[in-house]
Amino acid sequence: AKKGRVFSGARPTGRQHLGNYLGAIKNYVALQDEYDCVYGIVDLHALTTMETTKDLKQNTLEMALDWLAAGMDPQKSIIMIQSHVPELTELHTILSMVAPLGKLTDLPTFKEKIRDQPHNINYGLVGYPVLMSADILLYKANAVPVGVDQAPHIEFAREMARSFNYRYGKKVLIEPEMKVTQIPKVLGIDGERKMSKSLDNHIEIAATPEETTKRVMMMVTDPNRKLRSDPGNPDICNVFTMHKMFSSPEEVEMVNTECRRAGIGCVDCKKLLAKNMNAYFEPFRERRAEMAKHPDDIFAILEDGSQRAHIIAAQTMAEVRDAIGM
Ligand code: ADP
Ligand code: NA
């Protein structure tokens, strides 16, 4: 028997990068055997910041290809599109009546948005955590795998469940536990900021070996190591951090030792990393290329997942309506 249900969602951001892979996808794949997983491509959430939707379909496809080729398995899990389960918006509306506005506007993520896009502070942006709560609670998720930065949102979802159950006098909604991902923050090739598409410091997992090598060669290493003869400090080098993810223990040991005594230069160190990264992703890239030949099959998988999600959602909504007396 499974340990319970997991829900997690990600906005359709197109091709996924190493940060998405190490910080989320790998974990999604691993959880599938222990939990009943529902993984959503959260397109409604994406609308809060999108000014045009011309790439929405393509980005959904690219992300789904990465997910599926990486091992997210529609036989084991529900992989779906958020907006294709209409019960979500109904629960969102109901939860919005128990959501304290002051708390929403105080959330650090909302304050960041005010700073980043002051020209587009829409109503949906304030309600982002309410919509997220609705997703989690609709599927009665016991656990939500997320990065630490999402902790206030999970706390908010727990509060939504408690408030709803208290107000309507029935224990319908379940308070989800937060499941912090092991690798909360993958740095970009700048070695400084969180890897992110918008910062253009990312490496796409579906990139060609040549593109991957090119990006790896651009990685910033220990800034104090200026000459080839200078010893380096792997502890502060993002290339070394990546070696730990993609290279053998022997190679990690070798890099660790040789960098410190200038036995290996940054160029050779990066070449080794690129080679190992490409070897790691080769089977993934082959599977992905095969799947990409049949985009209709990918959308059919998402449609089937959305149907299966809809069955769970309809059950929860029946209980929600009953508790309210609607
Ligand atoms: P979303 O807004 O839907 O979370 P993102 O593309 O920002 O979309 O992230 C998708 C997932 O990948 C999230 O679980 C996020 O925590 C994870 N993620 C994104 N970038 C990184 C990174 N640089 N390091 C670790 N995890 C990351
Ligand atoms: Na995010």
Image: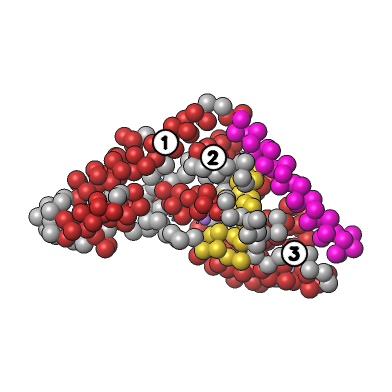
Q: Where is residue 164 in the image (x, y as percent from the top left)?
A: 77, 68
Indicate yes or no whether the magenta region holds residue 94. Answer: no
Quadrant for the N terminus, please. Answer: bottom right
Q: Mark 2 falls on what kind of element?
A: helix
Q: Nearer the viewer, residue 166 or 245?
A: 245
Indicate yes or no whether the magenta region holds residue 311. Answer: yes
Nearer-N-terminus badge (3/1): 3
Q: Where is residue 203 in the image (x, y as percent from the top left)?
A: 38, 45
Amino acid carrying label 1: it is Pro
Nearer-N-terminus badge (2/3): 2
Q: Position of residue 147 (x, y in %)?
A: 50, 61
Q: Position of residue 121 (x, y in %)?
A: 61, 57
Nearer-N-terminus badge (1/2): 2
First to last magenta residue range? 297-326
In the rendered image, the residue lying farthest to the right is 325
Circle 2 crowding by C-alpha within 10 Å: few under 14, some 14–19, many from 20: many
The disc label shown at residue 68, or none: 2
Asked whether residue 77 is in view, the answer is: yes
The disc label shown at residue 297, or none: none
Amino acid carrying label 2: it is Leu
Alpha carbon separation for disc pair 1 and 2: 13 Å
Quadrant for the C terminus, please. Answer: bottom right
Q: Which of 265 and 52 is in front in this view?
A: 265
The chosen color scheme is secondary structure
Q: Mark 1 falls on what kind of element?
A: helix
Circle 1 is placed at which residue position? 283
Prevailing secondary structure class for the magenta stretch in the rendered image: helix
Circle 3 is placed at which residue position? 173
* Residue at image coords 61%, 66%: 177
Alpha carbon separation for disc pair 2 and 3: 30 Å
